[in-house]
Amino acid sequence: MMICAPIKKKTTGSLIKAIKDAQKHVEVIEVWFDELKSLNNKDLKNIFAIKPHPFIYKCQNIENIDAILKFKPEYIDLDIDTPSKFTKKIGPKTSLIISCHNFKETPSTKTLKALAKKIKSKGADIIKIATQANDFEDSIRMLSFLSELHKKGERAICICMGEKGQITRTAGLILGNYLMYAPIKESDASAPGQLTVKQLQWHLK
């Protein structure tokens, strides 16, 4: 079981402090470098110097990708619509997560399968699909889809957002999710419905 703490901060100092705290509680850190007000090589050296745990670089601003890749993060998370000229830059030592988010609904299983196929065709090492759960049936459908991917040997992160999607954040780890996102504090959540690290660990006891 791997728990990943998402961290979004505006300054390097606050980011480093949050990383040091999170590393006491989780196995992976997802750093939203694009949230920083400024980003230079010195700051990056200071940040990567304190990481005994793997980093996921959550990339929204593609212009920052070259600067980050110099430090060889273990993972990088790119959107499904990222042009291939950027996905091809990812080296063999960095696992590529390609993600698709739907903040309105959870589509049919047929559509989920098509999304997974598209993600794999873009060279993803790890499939990530996050959708909005409007009812519990959405979450059950997502968990069934995750289980199917897991049986095929695919590394995947399949979750539903929102209150009705929280079951995918607990049962998902049992059914094959590669990792689960959980903030240290509720105020640090990066998506609706995320449980904190303590809450997630309590559910998994």
Image (tube, rainbow, N blue to C red):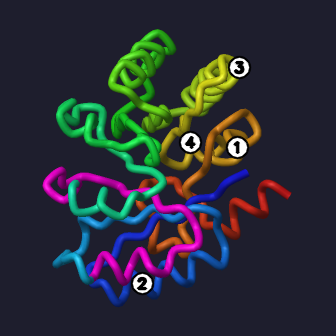
Tell me which numbered mark, 4 or 1, is placed earlier along the sequence: 4
The residues bearing labels 3 and 1 have C-alpha atoms spaced at a distance of 14 Å
Where are the magenta residues, as a range? 43-65
Which residue: 42% across, 58% down? 73
Nearest to N terminus: mark 2 or mark 1: 2
Mark 4 residue type: Gly
Q: Look at discs 4 and 1 and give the one toward the viewer.
A: 1
Side of 183 relative to 123 (left or right)? right
Looking at the picture, how far across and down is residue 54, in whole percent?
54, 62
Comparing 108 with 11, the one in front is 11
Q: Report the amino acid beneath label 3.
A: Lys
The residue labelled by disc 2 is 16
The tag earlier along the polypeptide, 3 or 1, is: 3
Label number found at residue 165: 4
180 to the left or right of 96: right
Asked if labels 1 and 4 touch by Cβ distance under 8 angstroms, the answer is no
Instruction: List x then y, in percent, for residue 191.
Output: 42, 55
Q: How many marks?
A: 4
State the residue position of label 1. Answer: 173
Residue type highlighted by circle 2: Ile
The mark nearer the N terminus, 3 or 2, is: 2
Label ID, residue 10: none
Q: Position of residue 158 (x, y in %)?
A: 54, 35
In space, the residues marked 4 and 3 are separated at their CA atoms by: 22 Å
User: Which of label 4 and label 3 is nearer to you?
Assistant: 3
Q: Amino acid at mark 1?
A: Leu
Q: Which residue is mark 3?
A: 151
Question: Looking at the picture, does residue 131 appear above or below residue 51?
Answer: above
Kindly tell me whether residue 61 is visible in this rendering: yes
- Please name the residue shown 44% across and 80% down the image: 49
